[in-house]
Image (cartoon, helix red, strand yellow):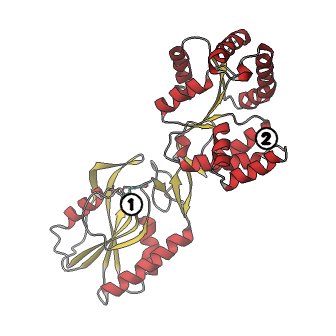
């Protein structure tokens, strides 16, 4: 992984793959051009590497020239293309092949066609090493395409992010999941975690992963992981962390378009917190915060006893059981508070007040991340 300015990029297309694509293109173009001497026109700045490597592979005589256009600002293509250096030689009657590093919206290509409109060339062919079909908005024919890529920003091999990255010999892709907001939600029984998770997932387009629900789902549907988990439970053994992590990973995989996840009921130990960090790293992401709803014990007891009266949940009916559950919660989560505090990710939120007030408090923590 590399960092350029404020953004992270991960390896995407290797130097070997680029080399193979250029070899294919050189052979294809040479076959079609035949005995004519083509003029390869590189579009600066980005195409300098493509042109250099491509013409070395071109098996027959050719000419090389450049024009210089500018269209990109940061990570977005702009409509406004500036012609910085135009054509400096007469191309009347010539076979011209444009060599592009990348075709994105096609705005640059439209400008190229404008430039060549009055040049009376014999033929104008477009060759590009990279092409983003999902971003392309024009209908100019692309005669030679090296590698089609998804509509994500890339750097390397001539392509830059605000000036940096052009010198990299391979292609890196922007890491987008870095923008995910992933929360670990904590709270003693009765703190209102479930209620708040519902609001947060709506407001921030987050997916609420309640470990208990995930377990029940896998066991009920007899997924491979569910069957495995059950085999431990049937023996009265703890389900190994890795099995739980694999289930969570499956949930994350199912929801790659979410803005992030609310983990609820996991992690419960340091080892699990580390495993969760590892999982998020493998997804190019991270846990951004542990948010703990803080509610005074006496209020929790009162709330749970109240709930017990209407819900009929046996563990909500007995005050000493309730107090035990609360004590156990603090015993178990103390280590996690330390774990996330050490990374400056622990946020305690006052969980006493109206539901709306608490949502507002949670939101201000999330907005500050
Ligand atoms: P278009 O005009 O939108 O087709 O974009 C073409 C120009 O934008 C290219 O010549 C590049 O300079 C730049 N560009 C497009 N996509 C990327 C990218 O993913 N990374 C870096 N530059 C890009
Ligand atoms: Mg370019």
Residue 108 visible in image = yes
Tell me where residue 191 appears, x and y as whole percent: 65, 19
Residue annotated with mark 1:
132
Q: 228 or 8: which is nearer to us?
A: 228
> Compared with residue 328, is residue 247 higher up or lower down, i.e. above or below?
below
Q: Label 1 CB, ligand 1: below 8 Å? A: yes
Answer above or below: position of 275 versus 49.
above
- Picture coordinates of residue 199 (x, y %)? 51, 26
Secondary structure found at label 1: loop
Q: Residue at x 78, y 36 (%)?
A: 270
On residue 271, which mark appears?
2
At label 2, counting other C-alpha atoms closer than 10 Å, the crowd grade (few under 14, some 14-19, many 20 or more) is few
User: Is 100 above or below relative to 70?
Assistant: below
Mark on residue 173?
none
Q: Which of marks 2 and 1 precedes in the sequence?
A: 1
**Residue at x 75%, y 32% (from the top left corner):** 339
């Amino acid at each position: 992984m590399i960092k350029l300015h404020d953004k992270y990029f991960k390896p995407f297309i290797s130097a070997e793959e680029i080399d193979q694509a250029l070899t294919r293109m050189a052979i294809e173009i040479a076959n079609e051009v035949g005995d004519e001497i083509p003029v390869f026109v590189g579009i600066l700045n980005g195409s300098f590497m493509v042109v250099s490597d491509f013409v070395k592979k071109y098996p027959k005589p050719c000419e090389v020239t450049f024009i210089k256009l500018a269209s990109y600002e940061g990570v977005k293509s702009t409509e406004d293309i500036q012609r910085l250096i135009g054509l400096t030689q007469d191309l009347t009657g010539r076979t011209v092949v444009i060599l592009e590093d990348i075709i994105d919206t096609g705005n640059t290509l439209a400008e190229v066609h404008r430039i060549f409109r009055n040049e009376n060339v014999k033929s104008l062919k477009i060759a590009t090493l990279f092409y983003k079909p999902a971003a392309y908005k024009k209908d100019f024919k692309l005669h030679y395409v090296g590698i089609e890529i998804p509509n994500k920003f890339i750097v390397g091999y001539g392509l830059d992010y605000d000036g940096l990255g052009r010198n990299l010999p391979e292609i890196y892709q922007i890491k987008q999941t870095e923008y995910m907001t992933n929360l670990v939600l904590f709270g003693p029984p009765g703190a209102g975690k479930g209620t708040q998770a519902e609001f947060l997932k709506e407001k921030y387009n987050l997916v609420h992963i309640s470990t208990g629900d995930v377990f029940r789902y896998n066991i009920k549907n007899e997924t491979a992981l569910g069957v495995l988990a059950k085999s431990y439970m049937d023996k009265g053994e703890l389900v190994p962390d890795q099995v739980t992590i694999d289930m969570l990973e499956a949930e994350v995989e199912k929801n790659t378009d979410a803005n992030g996840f609310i983990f609820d009921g996991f992690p419960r130990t340091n080892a699990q917190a580390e495993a969760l960090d590892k999982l998020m790293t493998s997804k190019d992401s991270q846990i951004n915060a542990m948010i703990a709803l803080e509610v005074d014990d006496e209020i929790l007891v009162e709330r749970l006893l109240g709930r017990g009266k209407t819900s009929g949940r046996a563990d909500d009916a007995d005050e000493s059981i309730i107090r035990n559950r609360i004590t156990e919660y603090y015993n178990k989560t103390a280590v996690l508070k330390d774990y996330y505090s050490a990374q400056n990710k622990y946020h305690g939120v006052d969980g006493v007040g109206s539901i709306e007030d608490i949502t507002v408090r949670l939101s201000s923590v999330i907005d500050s991340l």
